[in-house]
Every structure is written in C-alpha cells, then in structure tokens.
Amino acid sequence: MTLRVGVIGTGMIGRDHTRRLQQVLAGAQVVALSDYSPDAARAVGADLAPDAKIYDKGEDLIAASDVDAVLVCSTGATHEAYVLAAIAAGKPCFCEKPLATTADGAKRIVDAEVAHGKRLVQVGFMRRYDAGYVALKSAVDTHTGAPLMVHAAHRNPAVPEQYVTPMAIHDTFVHEIDVFRWLLDDDYVSARVTFPRATSASHAALRDPQIVTLTTAKGVVITTEIFVNCKYGYDIQCQVVGEEGTANLPEPQAITMRLGAKLQNDIMTDWKERFVASYDVELQDFIKAATAGTAAGPSAWDGYMAAVTCDACVTAQDADGAAVTITNPARPALYS
Ligand SMILES: NC(=O)C1=CN([C@@H]2O[C@H](COP(=O)(O)OP(=O)(O)OC[C@H]3O[C@@H](n4cnc5c(N)ncnc54)[C@H](O)[C@@H]3O)[C@@H](O)[C@H]2O)C=CC1
Ligand SMILES: O=C1[C@@H](O)[C@H](O)[C@@H](O)[C@H](O)[C@H]1O
C-alpha cells in the first residue's frame, strides 16, 4: 500500500520533506500540498509533486478523503490547530518541532490524542534518529557509567533578522531539550540561563550567545551553549561525563586534507545537510507506522514535555541567572 500524504507548509523544510517522500523514501506519495501562500505550494508541486492537489486551506487538505496522513511543516504557531484537526479526523500526523509554541497548546494535543485512545502524532525531533546520537546513547547506556554531567553546544553560523532571544529556546535549544531527555532517560527539574558577553554580530532583540543549565530529576547537570551567530559553521557538540568515563557525539564524516601547510577538514553550514540522514530515517519510521494507522517515535508527550521545559527556559532568560523550577505533569498510560 502507498501512503497518500498531504504536506501543510511548503517553506524550507516542507519542500525538503516533500523531496524525500517523493524521491528518497519508500511507501509514500505526496498527493496534496497547502501553504498560507498558495504560490509556494504550487512551486513545490511543480518541482516535486506535479500530481498533488493544491489546497488553499490546510484544514481542507486534512479532511480530504484521499489523504491518509499529514505532515505539518508550517510555522510553529500554526502547528497546534493543524495537529488537533488531524487527530479529530483520525489521521496520523507528523508535526515538525515545536509541537506547539506553549505548554498549554501542547497539552491540548496530548488530551485530544489520549481521548482518541491511540497514538497518531510523531514530533519532528530527528536527532533521536541520528546515527551519532544513537551511538552516543549506546555508549552512555553500556560503558560510561551513571551520567553526571553533559556539556553541549548548538551553534548556527547566522540567523534571520526576525530571530529574537526566546527563539534560541523554542526554535533552537528545543532539539537539545528533547534529545537529552531521551539520551539520559530522565526529566528536568530546573532551568537557569546566563548571558556571556554578547557578540557584536547580533542585535538589540537577540541576546547571543546564551548558556542554559538544566538539572534533571536524577541530578545530572547539563550545560548548553546556544550561539546562533557563530559565523564559522553549523556545529553541534555534546559530551556526556559518566562515573566511568566520557563519551562524545561523533563529528560528521569529512575528508581530512593536508593542504598548503595546513591540516584541515570542512565544517557543515546548515541543518539540512548535517541531519540529512536522520530526517530520512524519521520519516521512513513515520510512513511505516502511519501505514498501520498509528504513530511511532517522539510522541505528543515528548512534544509537551519539551514545551513545558521551553516555557521554563524562557522565564529563566529574564531571571538574572536564577533557577526556575520545572514541574512535570503525570504521564498518561498512552505514553508509558
Ligand atoms: N527539525 C528540524 O531540524 C527543523 C525544523 N523546522 C521547523 O519546521 C517548521 C517550518 O520551518 P521552515 O520550513 O524553516 O520555515 P519557512 O518559513 O521556510 O516555511 C514555513 C512555511 O509555512 C507557511 N505558513 C505560514 N503560516 C501558515 C499557515 N497558517 N498554514 C499553512 N502554511 C503556513 C509559510 O508561508 C511558509 O511557506 C518550523 O516549525 C521549524 O521550527 C525547521 C527547520 C529545521
Ligand atoms: O531546527 C532548526 C531550525 O529551525 C533552527 O532555527 C536552528 O537553530 C536549528 O539549528 C535547526 O536544527
């Protein structure tokens, strides 16, 4: 059976996911596209899915009888309404991060899915599918002993002018929030944010870099540098320090050159390239589960827990370095 997929939001990642569904992965076909700007949907259709029907409204795409499953790739603030509509229609839904821009919004999705009684939602936390993180988790689970600390960095070369201080949490750090819960099998109890000297490459509405310190229920302290105007490349770093040893996230494969009296290798410059294989694997997982009428991988609960933590981190950005407590809600049986 070929899964008939509708894609809502045909910007950067909507286009890229349409390409992988049409050209890379097995078992799915994009039959419908929708975007706030219909011209953007038409352009992606013309380039990648000429037979796809273009819908002016995402809600109509979700309701269409020939759409089996939905990909929500529009801007973050629009996700909640589309995911709720997909659940109401009983259709599997892959939602790009964030699941919702507030914890309350994510909770409404969890409540709707629990009421439906079966998982339908997968959140686009693709790092859980990254071969490097999978290897790191295996090392942490089997070799390095009880984790004590994590040191991490999330660096982007530059961000658009409209990117402001809270986005460093909701848009960027949200990946670490999810992947470290999974990596450590733990939840967060507090968040603290400090701001080093600001880079001159930023502007008044974006305090950059920032350092977030999360403490987990088991007492692990995680420090992450978020630096979104680092200039030199897209660089994701992670080191777990355990009782017996340390484990580092592997560097992406790159040719090492001895050239012009220098030892050098390229550093990637964007997320599309850095995590290309992870996006492929996560969506193949979505196709497999959605074909069976359900969802796997990062759940609406994971999206909700990430949103709760994001809210605490954003509060901590204005707390002058003080710790903000994170209260974890009770987990419904659907997500156990
Ligand atoms: N997992 C990952 O690594 C990444 C995830 N993302 C997430 O994907 C989502 C989209 O990001 P980008 O593609 O980078 O943004 P983008 O700005 O390139 O594309 C967003 C698209 O959504 C459309 N849109 C806006 N409101 C809409 C609405 N109400 N209904 C339908 N379409 C609407 C816009 O017209 C635009 O075409 C965001 O939530 C972002 O956080 C983005 C990049 C990487
Ligand atoms: O998800 C992503 C973007 O939306 C975000 O803007 C970047 O900071 C992240 O590095 C990237 O992975």
Image (cartoon, grey):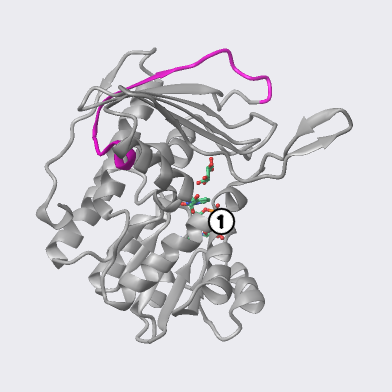
Q: Residues within 10 Å of mark 1 (few under 14, many from 20)?
A: some
* Residue beneath the point at 46% across and 50% down: 130
| Magenta segment boundaries in residue numbering | 181-201
* Residue beneath the point at 39% across and 12% down: 320
* Residue beneath the point at 22% across and 64% down: 119
Q: Quadrant of the N terminus?
A: bottom left
Residue 1 can be seen in this image: yes
Q: How many marks?
A: 1
Q: Nearer the viewer, residue 53 or 283?
A: 283
Q: Is residue 124 left or right of residue 312?
A: right
Residue 45 colored magenta?
Answer: no
Q: Which of the 4 image quarters holds residue 262?
A: top right
Residue 179 can be seen in this image: no
- Residue type at mark 1 is Val
Above or below for 200 versus 173: above
Residue 189 colored magenta?
Answer: yes
Tell me residue 127's x, y (percent).
Answer: 44, 48
Q: Nearer the viewer, residue 268 or 67?
A: 268
Tell me residue 312's x, y (percent).
Answer: 31, 29
Residue receiving disc 1 = 276
Above or below for 143 versus 302: above
Instruction: Please tell me whether mark 1 sits on a helix, a strand or a loop.
Output: helix
Tell me residue 99's x, y (percent).
Answer: 35, 51
Q: Which of the 4 image quarters holds residue 93?
A: bottom left
Q: Which of the 4 image quarters holds residue 214?
A: top left
Q: Is residue 295 left or right of residue 258?
A: left
* Residue beneath the point at 18% across and 31% down: 327
Tell me residue 163's x, y (percent).
Answer: 56, 37
Kindly give the residue lying farthest to the right in the view shown. Answer: 260
